[in-house]
Image (cartoon, rainbow, N blue to C red):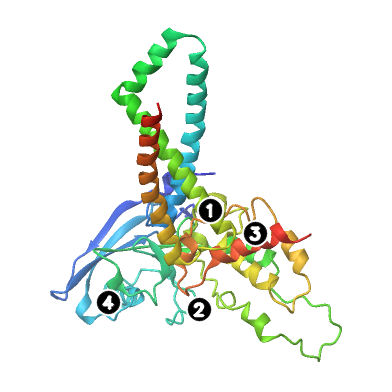
């Protein structure tokens, strides 16, 4: 009896490394950012409706969930910015050595966390 | 298409357990993907306890030891055992490589051995590479020169020859292509790192006169631009080559060339 040839396991068994993690996160944050921009536009247009809608937004933003969303979006944008710069440099043909790509990947990950804090502090003090 | 889960008939079941019979104190557990086409069963993982005191240093030595001393039904490809033929490419410890050059010391804990990822399995650790070879053929990997003379040497400068370094050493073991998530999801259209590195090798060869035609041929959304610099290919290459960089160079040539 001839059995149908099975497909060998792939993403289930393949080991992650810095570069592949940054690459997949770049895609995920890209999707998050599109949703986030829609969300921000929605808030901006809600403000036109007057004080009562402002109150609702303010209530949501000061809640724990609201703060988490704000921080999440800030991180998502920070990550996307740095990762995009990394991709731009790679498009110029640089940074393809294994060690370099690992270092730039780590820079993106830790840099995005630092940038999140900076953006958050600037935003909090401006408003 | 992105397909995270394995199809139903490819799901892996628990297999047999081969207990050590030598009484050795230095044992390692080796888990190997098995699939027998003569039965109607799903693939399974068989576990073997291997006496490491009497086993040389590479993963291929473990496989040979299992085949010779424990379970002769195990099927895998191997030939030169020196990292030149590319036959024993497989997934060891979650990373693609050549079993004959991969020291088992570098793998922590149990040693998990699978066939190259996202291939149709012929038997046990043997994957079907037909698709990849067809793609290799499609880039016409031979010198195209219109020179009429068949006796005259085509001279190449040292600088031009140096451009082939890092490309001609490829042994087409498919470690890189089968490590690439883009190739997993779009392997029917995307050429993959191994074939693109070879495409690059012929594009930069100063003796070849079909450079523009070759570039035009790979300039395709699916054939070339599915590379998203994930870098799995470069990290998997057992020969230390850099297919990701070669693909970036092709992209750069296309962006700057006037074709």
Using the rendered image, report if marks 2 and 1 lie on a common chain: no
Of the two numbered discs 2 and 3 on the same chain, state the one appearing first in sequence: 2
- Mark 3 neighbour density, 10 Å: few (under 14) some (14–19) many (20 or more): many
CA separation, marks 4 and 2? Answer: 25 Å
Q: CA distance from mark 2 to mark 1?
A: 34 Å
Left or right of residue A35, residue B251 in this image: right
Q: Is residue B117 visible?
A: yes
Q: Secondary structure at mark 1?
A: helix
Q: Whole-percent x and y of residue B157?
A: 70, 85
Residue A14 in view of the camera? no
> Between marks 4 and 1, how big is the CA–CA gap?
50 Å
Mark in the foreground, 4 or 2: 2
The vertical placement of B37 against A124, above or below, is below
In percent of width and height, residue A24 lies at 45, 47
Residue B251 got which mark?
3
Where is residue B251 shown, x and y percent of the image?
65, 59
Tell which subunit mark 3 falls on. Answer: B
Residue at 38% x, 12% y: name it.
A55
Q: Chain of mark 2?
A: B
Q: Which residue is mark 2?
A: B85
Front residue of this view, candidates B197 and B127: B197
Q: Nearer the viewer, mark 4 or mark 1?
A: 1
Tag 4 near tag 1, CB within 8 Å: no
Which residue is under mark 4? B69
- Work out whether B103 lies above or below B34: below
> What is the CA distance from the residue labelled 2 to the residue labelled 3?
29 Å
């Amino acid at each position: 009896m001839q059995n149908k040839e099975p497909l060998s396991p792939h993403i289930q068994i393949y080991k992650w490394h810095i570069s592949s993690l940054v690459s997949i996160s770049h895609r995920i944050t890209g999707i998050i950012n599109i949703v986030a921009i829609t969300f921000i536009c929605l808030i901006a247009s809600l403000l036109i409706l007057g004080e009562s809608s402002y109150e609702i937004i303010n209530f949501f933003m000061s809640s724990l969930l609201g703060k988490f969303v704000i921080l999440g979006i800030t991180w998502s944008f920070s990550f996307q910015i740095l990762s995009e710069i990394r991709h731009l440099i790679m498009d110029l043909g640089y940074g393809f050595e294994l060690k370099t790509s690992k270092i730039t990947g780590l820079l993106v990950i830790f840099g995005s966390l630092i940038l999140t804090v900076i953006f958050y502090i600037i935003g909090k003090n401006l408003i | 298409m992105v397909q995270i889960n394995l199809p139903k008939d490819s799901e892996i079941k628990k297999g047999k357990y081969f207990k050590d019979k030598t009484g050795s104190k230095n044992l390692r557990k080796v888990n190997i993907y098995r699939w027998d086409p003569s039965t109607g069963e799903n693939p399974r993982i068989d576990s073997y306890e291997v006496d490491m005191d009497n086993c040389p240093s590479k993963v291929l030595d473990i496989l040979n030891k299992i085949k010779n001393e424990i379970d002769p039904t195990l099927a895998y490809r191997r030939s030169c055992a020196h990292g030149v033929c590319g036959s024993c490419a497989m997934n060891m410890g979650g990373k693609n490589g050549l079993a004959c050059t991969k020291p088992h010391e570098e793998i922590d804990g149990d040693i998990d051995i699978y066939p190259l990822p996202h291939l149709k399995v012929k038997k046990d650790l043997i994957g079907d590479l037909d698709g990849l070879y067809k793609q290799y053929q499609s880039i016409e990997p031979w010198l195209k020169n219109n020179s009429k003379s068949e006796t005259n040497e085509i001279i190449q400068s040292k600088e031009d020859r140096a451009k082939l370094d890092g490309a001609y050493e490829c042994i087409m073991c498919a470690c890189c292509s089968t490590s690439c998530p883009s190739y997993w999801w779009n392997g029917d259209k995307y050429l993959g790192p191994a074939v693109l590195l070879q495409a690059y090798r012929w594009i930069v060869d100063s003796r070849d006169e079909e450079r523009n035609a070759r570039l035009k041929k790979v300039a395709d959304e699916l054939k070339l631009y599915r590379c998203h610099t994930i870098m799995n290919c470069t990290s998997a290459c057992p020969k230390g080559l850099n297919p990701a960089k070669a693909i970036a160079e092709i992209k750069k040539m296309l962006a700057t060339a006037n074709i």
